Amino acid sequence: MRRTPWLAATTLALLAAVAFGDPPAPEGNPPGGPPPQGGRPPQGAPPSKGGRPPRGEPMGGPWVHRVLSATSTDGLTFTRDEGVRWAHASVPCVVADGDRLLLYAVDADRGPGQPESANVSVSTDGLRFEKQTLVVEGMTSRKALDPCVVRDPAGGFRLYYLGADADGDPARAAGDHAIHVARSEDGVRFREVGVALARPALVDPDVFFFGGTWFCHVFGRGRTELATSKDGLTFAYERDLDLDGLGTVAPVLLDDGRLRLYAFEQRKPAGNAFVSFVSTDGRTWTREEGVRLQGADDEQVTDPYVVRWKGGWRMYFKSEPRRRGEGPPPQGGPDERAARGPRGGPRGPGGDAPPFDGQGRPNRRRSGPWDHDVLVAKVARDGATTPKATFPRAGVPTLARLADGRLLAATQHFPADDDAAFDKVAVRTSSDDGATWSAPEVIRVEGLPEGLRFPFDPTLVPLPDGRVRLYFTANLRRGEPGGKPPTPSIGSAVSKDGTTFVYEPGARFAVEGRPVIDCAVVLHRGVFHLFAPDNGTGGPPRQDAPSSQRPRSGVGYHATSKDGLVFERQPDVTMDGPLRWLGNAQSDGDTITFLGTADGGLWSASSADGTTWTSPTRWTTVAGADPGFVRLSDGAWLVVFTGPPREDARRRGDGPPETGRFPPGPPREGDGRGEPRPPGPPDGEGDDPDAPRPPRQDGPPRGPRPDGPPPEEPDEPDPPTDGR
């Protein structure tokens, strides 16, 4: 049990906007977090941005915690090591694996949009640690908290963790709390086994194997509980430990066969100490004289995890400052907001606000993509259009048909009542060709590397083996080497179920010096074709910018790949007029159809090879953008697109009213093969892209995001709340 009170969250995060790269570390000095007192950089801390927590996360809790270390020759008298082992981390656990140490902790610096969760760092000297990416395949919870990893007697490793979905202090969640177990061969990539123990208010499990029995110390309802198991997979509560006012970790086996248990004073908020106990049976503990390590007056020390390694004793513990300053400068600037690009572009005189305000809260009171719904419609071969569904407060839709026949829709998700899910990718499924849909579920992406933002701008592509690949805009959260701003590119992840994805390393497609975002990908005749709009060199649009830096109207990037992973750029695709390659592509085996975004609605065109295209068909009456579509079994289309502003946004005064319309009119003949073309405008409206159109007053997001919102008075912060 390693329970300790958390600091109240008095400040929320600033929006992580542009991220400039950290300057290169001097030769011979490891990268690290903010320097400790005295100005010396910490030795061996995993790379950290410093600054403030990921957007939406409070400044208290794990963000202000540090993992420190100490050494001993006898396990009784410990001396602190210089520096920080891991900044913005909490609840450490360490395992010796030959010549390396595996240090596990709750990592609060996993990137904007990602909640705190278990992670691992590796060291060969016990001081300098390199952060890895811990993966739990098949994890059913949003977060893995309070990790405890032990060597498995049968080989490999076991991870025990608290599965949590809610933000804030997990101890306050209602109902039974589940302690999960997962197994691994290498201590980095685990596979979920199941729930090992579930009881009310459980947190902080510590598991060890002794005398043929598995023991679990776990904190619950204000005390340390003892549970036991024969196989370490299913535990049963036995009794409470008689260690009032003390928190514990897993014990260490001594040479004489006894166990030594290290503990910390829970009720002393600062200047507390570590003590120890010994036991011959793992159930009854006798306190040893003296103090193992004394905390400073301006910190609380907890979670003293000890390992015997290379002839000595090493302790890793959490330090929480009790006199907290303002911290390093906040991160970000305008360029990364602009890199979010067309899917959250300007709308109205003030332009869109970034997703989160200066306090780290969703910016729902300002204009933005959260002011729109995704509309779903069935368009028959004769042009009859039937509205089918609405996905509230969503954008960037994409559709795919899974191997089992279900439809999978993915959108950018902006719920009104769930801050943790705000601006995340969520999926829905339909088993009746879009008539009804499941509730939205935020995707999980395992194995995201350190420094990469959570995916956004989803595109789904079914694969021949039954899996589905997610292509997305990938962006570093700190920038590139040398201090350059981050340049977005296209990344990917793959899934067997459409909900849990595994990151595929590397960039699928990138253009030097120009952001590549909002891609469409289609598998056609054994070749993957990728299309993306040309958004110029990024950043807020400027009228005086050279033409080479501006977005090129009607021009899109085109790249091809045999495996969907390594793409080779092809000649750009072009359309005459103010058309954007922002949308979706589908193949019927003979022809690729692209449905894209125009300044006054949608457009479509077809191609046999992805290079040469028919003239575009304009859908000038569609108040929508960024469409996705699939062919239904009866030959009709199911179309999803971002609709006009919601009624509540228009009442807020963000623009004139606008009526949402679905694609009307019959399909057109004459694509050269006698097949119907995609649904077009009503009879009487031509396909000339330069035909006059009524001026556009308002509409869904288009174009790059502006350089932040207009000036405004800062929001009043919320009252302090407890949280990690």
Image: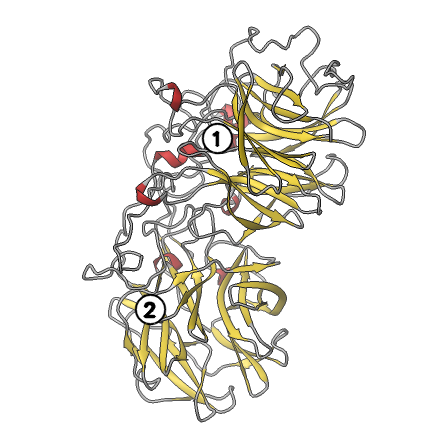
Q: Which residue is mark 2?
A: 127
Q: Position of residue 714 (x, y in %)?
A: 33, 37
Count all numbered tags in the image, as a single digit.
2
Tell me the tag on residue 671. Answer: none
Q: Is residue 153 left or right of residue 589?
A: left
Residue 490 picture location, percent across and down: 51, 39
Q: Residue at x 49, y 67 (%)?
A: 147
Residue extending farthest left: 38
Q: What residue occupies the far right of the structure in this picture?
A: 634
Looking at the picture, does residue 562 appear above or below residue 189? above
Q: Which residue is mark 1?
A: 344
Q: Confirm or deny contact between disc 1 and disc 2 (CB under 8 A).
A: no
Q: Is residue 691 above or below residue 702?
A: above
Q: What is the spatial separation of the Cα atoms under label 1 and label 2, in whole angstroms?
A: 44 Å
Type of the residue with mark 2:
Leu
Q: Which residue appears at 63% of the width and 10% of the height?
A: 687
Q: Earlier in the sequence, mark 1 or mark 2?
A: 2
Residue 46 quadrant:
bottom left
Nearer to us in this view, 302 or 543: 543
Q: Is residue 169 left or right of residue 647?
A: left
On the question of residue 607 being in view, the answer is: yes
Q: Amino acid at mark 1?
A: Gly
Q: Which element carries disc 2, helix, strand or loop? A: loop
Rendering quarter of residue 32? bottom left
Instruction: Name the residue located 30 percent from the left edge and 60 percent from the top edge.
Output: 30
